[in-house]
């Protein structure tokens, strides 16, 4: 890993702050690739809502400016990605999102609330046996995996596979997977695909109260999702909702431990859990940045952009823009001006945001209430990712009550 990457992983906020001070929309070499880096809040929000900035590299690639795909992901026309809303633009994106929305309703999320409470309690009960815990392995990454499995209707005995699959996607989407990683990830993803194809077939004849059954039923006029689109959607939900939510929980708990005043406030007043989640999302967002591609020659924020150029939108930079909030470098769960773009904005605004918030609130509330005298052991290391923000491990000593 280069010196710049190490510096970035250690403190991405300092890199984004320095860029913002030069210009909130800056043309520069970022990790060796020329691109626009957007670090101002207003500019990032406007850009995410602007249809001239697209996700499909191919559509923009007609001008002779060779766009560099910033995430090393295969372009959407390759296999599964073609059927995932995250990698598509209107009108295909709109169609997929509308159909999935018919199934993934607020009622679906509300139905999960008591299930999330009970999964969180069970995981913490299992921690009782030991005075030391690795929070990510024992709690933060299991909780969202089990929740997505429940949401989709994956039987209990199959839920162990989940983490491999979402880890495989996580590595795919990051900047620099090795060839070996790509091959093993491809195998994991093929397994996951076959698994969901079979489960969808089962649910066609035996529907239940779960998301897969609702996806099968979802209709817009005469239009429905085909099996390939359903498989892609299941995988997208596994990948999009696992690593991210796990990081939200770990980052939030670590921030609270580092800020004892905030920790005591939440412990004394559990209704602050939603505010603690929002401030965690703002301060230490699980996804640091997302990309778009310029669809046509245009002017944005006073900058002339050319078709095919890549734009990196630094959500984590926008979240600490002093022009929209006071003392953005302070972690404060009772701030009155908590604004963030951690779920993005515009047409791709995170479809799972209500579920992520609910999981985050329940998890932080339970951790603060049930872990007595928690202490961090050692110095946790950040994952070596420049897109996702989360720790590799978080070892703690605490009595579980
Ligand atoms: C704290 C946890 C989460 C964070 C920080 C997060 C963040 C994001 C962001 C930034 C995007 C937009 C990407 C872009 O514009 O390029 C997104 C999209 C998406 N997220 Fe999440 N997410 C989280 C949890 C979840 C969960 C729990 C689910 C579902 C189970 C989910 C499902 C999705 C889907 C399906 C999309 C694509 C939406 C579209 O393209 O229209 N996410 N998420």
Image (tube, grey):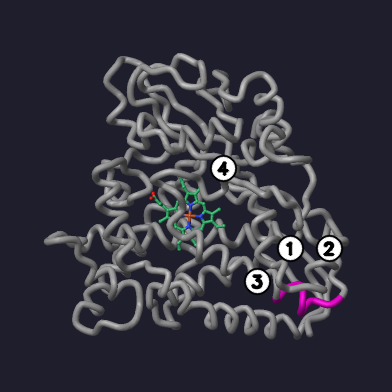
Question: Which residue carries the number 1 mark?
Answer: 253
Up/down of 240 relative to 197, above or below: above
Mark 2 or mark 3: name the one nearer the start of the chain: 3
The location of residue 81, given as percent across then percent down, is: 32, 48
Magenta-colored stretch includes residue 371: yes
Category of crowding for the residue at label 2, using alpha-carbon neighbours closer than 10 angstroms: few (below 14), some (14–19), many (at least 20): some
Q: Which mark is residue 387?
A: 4
| Local secondary structure at mark 1 | helix
- CB within 8 Å, label 3 to label 1: yes
Mark 3 or mark 1: name the one nearer the start of the chain: 1
Q: CA distance from mark 3 to mark 4?
A: 23 Å
Question: Which residue carries the number 2 mark?
Answer: 376
Mark 1 or mark 2: name the one nearer the start of the chain: 1
Category of crowding for the residue at label 4, using alpha-carbon neighbours closer than 10 angstroms: few (below 14), some (14–19), many (at least 20): some
Q: Residue at x 64, y 41 (%)?
A: 319
Magenta-colored stretch includes residue 194: no
Q: CA distance from mark 2 to mark 4?
A: 25 Å
| Local secondary structure at mark 2 | strand
Q: Which quadrant of the figure contains the N terminus?
A: top right
The location of residue 297, given as percent across then percent down, is: 36, 17
The location of residue 376, given as percent across then percent down, is: 83, 63
Q: CA distance from mark 1 to mark 2?
A: 11 Å
Mark 2 or mark 4: name the one nearer the start of the chain: 2
Q: CA distance from mark 3 to mark 1?
A: 9 Å
Task: Please report the bounds of the magenta region as a residue range.
Answer: 366-372
Question: Which residue carries the number 3 mark?
Answer: 363
Q: Residue at x 27, y 51 (%)?
A: 83
Q: Nearer the viewer, mark 2 or mark 3?
A: 3
């Amino acid at each position: 890993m280069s010196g710049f990457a190490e510096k970035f992983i250690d403190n991405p906020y300092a890199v984004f702050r320095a860029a913002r001070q030069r210009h909130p929309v800056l043309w520069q070499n970022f990790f060796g690739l020329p691109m626009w880096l957007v670090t101002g809040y207003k500019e990032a929000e406007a850009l995410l809502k602007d249809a001239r900035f697209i996700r499909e590299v191919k559509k923009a690639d007609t001008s002779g400016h060779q766009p560099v795909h910033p995430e090393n992901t295969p372009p959407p026309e390759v296999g599964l990605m073609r059927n995932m809303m995250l990698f598509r633009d209107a009108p295909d994106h709109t169609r997929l999102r509308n159909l999935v929305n018919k199934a993934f309703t607020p009622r679906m999320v509300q139905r999960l609330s008591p299930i999330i409470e009970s999964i969180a309690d069970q995981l913490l009960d299992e921690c009782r046996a030991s005075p030391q815990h690795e929070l990510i392995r024992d709690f933060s990454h299991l909780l969202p995996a089990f929740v997505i499995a429940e949401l989709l209707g994956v039987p209990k005995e199959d839920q162990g596979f989940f983490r491999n699959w979402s880890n495989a996607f996580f590595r795919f989407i990051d900047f620099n997977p090795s060839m070996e990683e790509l091959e093993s990830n491809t195998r994991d993803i093929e397994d996951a695909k076959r698994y969901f194809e079979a489960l969808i077939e089962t649910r066609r004849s035996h529907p239940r109260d779960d998301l897969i059954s609702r996806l099968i039923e979802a209709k817009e006029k005469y239009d429905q999702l085909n099996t390939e689109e359903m498989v892609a959607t299941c995988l997208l939900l596994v990948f999009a909702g696992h690593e991210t939510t796990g990081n939200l929980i770990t980052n939030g708990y670590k921030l609270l431990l580092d800020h004892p005043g905030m920790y005591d406030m939440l412990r004394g007043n559990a209704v602050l859990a939603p505010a603690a989640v929002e401030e965690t999302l703002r301060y230490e967002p699980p996804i640091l940045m997302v990309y778009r591609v310029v669809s046509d020659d245009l002017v944005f924020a006073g900058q002339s952009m050319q078709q095919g150029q890549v734009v990196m939108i630094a959500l984590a930079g926008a979240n600490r823009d002093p022009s929209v909030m006071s003392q953005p470098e302070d972690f404060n769960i009772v701030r009155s001006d908590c604004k963030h773009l951690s779920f993005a904005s515009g047409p791709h605004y995170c479809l799972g945001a209500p579920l992520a918030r609910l999981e985050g609130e329940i998890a932080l509330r339970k951790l603060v209430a049930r872990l007595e005298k928690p202490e961090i052991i050692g110095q946790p290391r950040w994952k070596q990712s420049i897109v996702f923000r989360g720790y590799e491990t978080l070892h703690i000593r605490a009595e579980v009550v």
